[in-house]
Amino acid sequence: MQRIGQVLKSNGKDGGVLVSFPDIDLEDLDLQEPVFIEFDGLPVPFFFESFTRRGTSRAIVTLTGIHSLKDAEEVCGKALFADYFEEEADEDLTGWTVRDADGTLVGTVSDYEDIPGNTCLWVRRPDGTEVLLPFHEDLVLGLDEKSGTLTLSIPDGLL
């Protein structure tokens, strides 16, 4: 998931919050897709109920489940994440060679599966079978753009 914004402060008594989106163009936001806020280290999905632009990089928003000043204050200072901004990068990996941590050839990326909060890569093995592997920053050991090679720390049992 990519960090797309930060909740700056509450706005009103009905759960509205002022959100800053410094690193993305507001036109690129898909208001039908969920955004995520981490609670206890886990991403919790929220949907936009209302969205009113305030300048070029801020907006007053209402998110599902946040309908009071108390709820809004609880998310103040928290980051907003989205995973649909990563799709283009995942598509660019199609055709890349995948190797395990020890250098063993795993196969070639044939496609990706965009599961919210858990993007996965379809990898075609040398024997023609396909395996679905998690594509998470904690598992990526290396990305060599010159050779088109992706090195992953693949958890036991997935191959």
Image: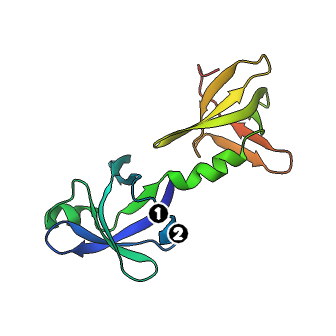
Q: Residues within 10 Å of mark 2 (few under 14, many from 20)?
A: some
- Identify the residue at image location x=74%, y=41%: 150
Q: Does residue 101 appear in this view?
A: no
Can you identify the residue that label 2 sits on? 24
Residue 142, x across and y down, in percent:
73, 45
Q: Is residue 2 above or below residue 107?
A: below
Q: Is residue 2 above or below residue 159?
A: below
Quadrant containing the C terminus is: top right
Q: Secondary structure at mark 1?
A: loop
Counting labels gives 2
Q: Secondary structure at mark 2?
A: loop
Disc 1 from disc 2: Cα separation: 8 Å
Name the disc covering residue 151, or none.
none
Residue type at tag 2:
Ile
Q: Is residue 9 above or below residue 75?
A: below
- Identify the residue at image location x=35%, y=49%: 45
Please tell me which of labels 1 and 2 falls first in the chain. 2
Closer to the camera, 131 or 149?
131
Q: Is residue 107 above or below residue 114?
A: above
Label 1 vs label 2, nearer the camera: 1
Quarter residue 139 falls in: top right
Residue type at tag 1:
Leu
Can you identify the residue that label 1 sits on? 29
| In the displayed structure image, the side of residue 48 where residue 97 appears, left or right | right
| In the displayed structure image, the side of residue 102 where residue 22 appears, left or right | left
- Find the residue positioned furthest to the bottom: 55
Residue 77, x across and y down, in percent:
33, 68
Residue 57, x across and y down, in percent:
45, 77
Circles 1 and 2, Cβ within 8 Å, touching? The answer is yes
Residue 54, x across and y down, in percent:
36, 81
